Amino acid sequence: MKIRTVFIALLLLACAVPTLPQTRGPADTVKAFYKFSNARSPVFNRRHIESRKRWYTAELYRLFLEELREQTEFLKQHPDEKPFFGDGLDFRPLNEPCQANGKSYQRSQSISRTEAGKNRAYVDVKFAYPKVCTEESIYYRVNLRRLGGRWLIDDWTYSDGMTLTREMRKN
């Protein structure tokens, strides 16, 4: 009888463990975001914002919606001009191919460094060509906040020190 009770308790515990909320660390959150985002269109529209919403803080999400409204108004007034995110928003530098030794190379993407505190984290994403290309690597810093037990993206800091949110507000 005791063995049967213990077996049932272990079986229930084994079934319950996978249903517990799973939280990713900051680096895993950024990897998952880029994997999702890189597989989708970079065109900046409502669908773009909504499809990535689960990774954003409420403030970043609000700023994207505000930028989309401004972009829509801009296009009504200036239909022949390109809006701020006219080339799309893919959260990476332009991926212009590098030509070396008669071959064409694309930038690779990797997590290079993570700094994490209790409620803030910074994950550096490195975009680099192979060594045969002489171009410098580019680093974007993804700024995250821990809210409700989850790491959410709050902003991006570019290699030149400018942030995405500052650029949107400045625009």
Image (cartoon, grey):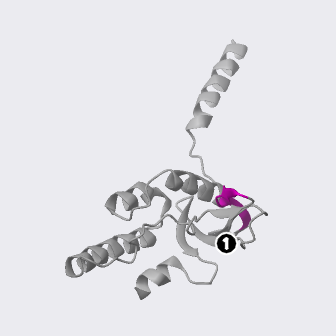
- For label 1, the crowd category at 10 Å Cα-Cα, with few meaning under 14, some 14 to 19 and many 20 or more, is many
Q: Which residue is mark 1?
A: 139
Name the quadrant of the N terminus: top right
Name the quadrant of the C terminus: bottom left
Left or right for 90, reference 101:
left
Q: Which residue is the extreme one toward the top?
A: 1
Q: Which residue is the extreme one toward the right?
A: 131
44 w.r.t. 80: above or below: above
139 w.r.t. 99: above or below: below
Is residue 121 a member of the stretch shown in magenta?
Answer: no
Closer-to-camera residue (24/160)? 160
Spot occupied by residue 123 in the image (x, y as percentages of width and height): 66, 67
Q: Quadrant of residue 86?
A: bottom left
Residue occupying the point 32% across, 71% down = 68
What amino acid is labelled 1 in the image? Tyr
Q: Quadrant of residue 15?
A: top right
Query: In the image, which residues are magenta?
Result: 102-114
Closer-to-camera residue (37/136)? 136
> What is the chief secondary structure element of the magenta stretch?
strand
